[in-house]
Image (spheres, rainbow, N blue to C red):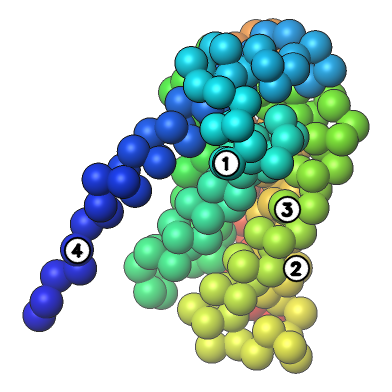
Amino acid sequence: MTSRPGPSLAQRKRQLVADELTEAALQLLALKGFDGVTVDEIVAAAGVSKRTFFRYFASKEDVVVQFLADMGTDMCAELASRPAGEPPSTALLRTVLVPLTTCGDHSEKALPLVRLILRTPALHARFLERQAQWREGLSTELARRLGLDPAADLYPHLAAGMALTAFDTVLWRWSENEAGDDPAELAEQAFAVIGTSLDTVG
């Protein structure tokens, strides 16, 4: 079996620049708020030109949108990798734990960013748009795992929606609570509430 070639040097350099821009932008946005940061400040922090920034992102909002897109990709990949026959409640919990565990492990950076997304109307709107896309991806994968027809069966869409509602609820609770809650533990609590319903496949 022929192995696939790894990314080229040019590709690795582009990814490195994109990562540096994203890191600089997200830190500034979380610190100063969405309206308090300019593209000029982002490129200065990242040490690149404005022209370089616009080769990667159309706007500062797109930096956050890409962050959300990556989060959704990671969740869909996790659900696809779960063992066959695993109860839907377990598979979906492990799915949403991927971003939530990362948030908890890097709370100093993640919590201000989550608050920014949830409390900035323009960003929250994009977050909800992304969740709708995630729901489609998760429901398609659930249908495949369970041998259901996503066009005919309600379960995959409902189950994906319930899991993402739990995910959203956890983020809101975590963002509003100053007590240092662990988002992964909050997710466990949420799925304890909805788990029985998720495992009732019609």
**Disc 4 to disc 3, how far (Cα)?**
33 Å
Mark 1 vs mark 4: give the one in front: 1
Q: Amino acid at mark 1?
A: Tyr
Front position in the image: 40 or 155: 40
x and y, in percent, of residue 82 in the image? 39, 63
- Give the secondary structure at mark 4: loop
**What is the number of the mark on residue 5?**
4
Q: Amino acid at mark 3?
A: Gln
Q: Amino acid at mark 4?
A: Pro
- Identify residue for label 2: 158
Give the mark nearer the N terminus: 2 vs 4: 4
x and y, in percent, of residue 184 in the image? 53, 33
In-image side of 176 versus 67 (left or right): right
- Identify residue for label 1: 56
Could you classify mark 4 by the number of other residues whose Cα lies within 10 Å: few (under 14), some (14-19), or many (20 or more)?
few
Give the mark nearer the N terminus: 4 vs 3: 4
Mark 2 vs mark 4: give the one in front: 4
**Disc 1 to disc 2, how far (Cα)?**
36 Å
Whether residue 191 is visible: yes
